[in-house]
Image (spheres, coloured by chain):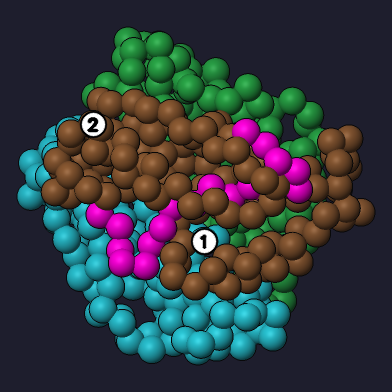
Chain colours: A cyan, B brown, C green
Amino acid sequence: MYQAEIEVETRGRGTYEITERVAAAVRSSRVAAGLCHVFITHTSASLLICENADPAVRRDLETFMADLAPDGDPRFVHTAEGPDDMPAHVRSILTQTDLTIPIRDGQLALGTWQGVYLWEHRLHAHRRRVLVTVQG
Amino acid sequence: MYQAEIEVETRGRGTYEITERVAAAVRSSRVAAGLCHVFITHTSASLLICENADPAVRRDLETFMADLAPDGDPRFVHTAEGPDDMPAHVRSILTQTDLTIPIRDGQLALGTWQGVYLWEHRLHAHRRRVLVTVQG
Amino acid sequence: MYQAEIEVETRGRGTYEITERVAAAVRSSRVAAGLCHVFITHTSASLLICENADPAVRRDLETFMADLAPDGDPRFVHTAEGPDDMPAHVRSILTQTDLTIPIRDGQLALGTWQGVYLWEHRLHAHRRRVLVTVQG
């Protein structure tokens, strides 16, 4: 059971690829066959396994979420932390707070087009903490 | 590998915090560093890691879901179990049936504002079963 | 730590039950108490734990998703791979790329009405790869 911590300094809303940083934790663990668990300790940013080739995919996901849970939505009562806070919680519960990825031959067994992303849902920059646990 | 069972008597639609009950299972397991897996054995109630400070956040999540998948939606064919049943299945697949949370220093390594909730999606009271597995 | 691979030949968009194939991997592992992890190596198909009795539930889920993220949606920029590709990515991030299910008495501890499904989101047939990891 190997545990590591990743800190991500976001520059505001958007997706930030962390695949290589998670893969580095797996290498450090020296686990050959097992599972890698990734957990984000926040409720206004989340985790995502997503297409890693065309950046337009992630821009379209932003468009989709912006329409589904618009900033400043008048339906929302929880507005004290800003017009983007409640939409951030909605985006967070619709995506993932934790992911588990298989490890084979000492590496993340992701598909060819899969990348691991942190999705910052708040408009402003934040420091986000991600906990990685590797077991084998 | 430590396994426990949590039973939650819901009073109908809404969120029910189970953080302390999951934490108690972790303490019983005496695992210091590892993972805690939480699983709900139902398809019309789900699990959620969500902001635990302002209850308005969870009320806003209800509002959001009620608009996204309204009770009695005429698009739905599966209506034999009532107008809230198919919306409950939709809410369930958009959120989580299982969660895994890291354990550090013998405790759930949740962020400051993270709580673990059971989300009852049916209008009426139900008895819900949650399985907890702790490994370290 | 037991690892197996499941290949699913889809006939295009729709849900394909894989409960029995996952259960067979658990039996092969001879694990009595533990966890079964299921991972799909794609970003345009996903995993789902869903009501397994009335097929209308899964048809209604299709209807819901088809309205939420319609094929050919003019908001989307990523269209090179066809009008159903970006909607497939949206459906994928709103559901699950990985699932973990408890094992008790050598069997998947699913609820009575829970089944495990692969959800093909592309219109055409695809060969999909699912990795199963059993630990106990």
In which chain is the residue bearing label 2? B
Of circles 1 and 2, which is in front?
2
Q: Is residue B105 above or below residue C51?
A: below
Residue A126 visible, this angle: yes
Left/right placement of residue A135 relative to residue C62 reads left
Number of the label disc, if any, that sits on residue A93: 1
Left/right placement of residue B64 relative to residue A80 reads right
Number of the label disc, if any, that sits on residue B29: 2
Q: Amino acid at mark 1?
A: Ile
Q: Between A79 and B89, which is closer to the camera in this rendering? A: A79
Which quadrant holds the N terminus of chain B? top left
Residue B97 horizontal/vertical position (percent): 52, 42
* Residue at mark 1 to residue at mark 2: CA–CA distance: 28 Å
Q: Between A79 and C44, which is closer to the camera in this rendering? A: A79
Residue B116 horizontal/vertical position (percent): 43, 52
Q: Magenta stretch containing residue C135, yes or no?
A: no
Q: Amino acid at mark 2?
A: Ser
Q: Magenta stretch containing residue B124, yes or no?
A: yes
Residue drawn 36% across the image and 38% down it: B37
Residue drawn 63% across the image and 67% down it: B59
Q: Is residue C24 above or below residue A101?
A: above
Residue sitting farthest toward the right: B74
In which chain is the residue bearing label 1? A
Which quadrant holds the C terminus of chain B? top left
Residue C81 horizontal/vertical position (percent): 59, 62
The stretch of residues the image draws in magenta is: B109-127
- Please tell me how many numbered marks the rendered image carries: 2
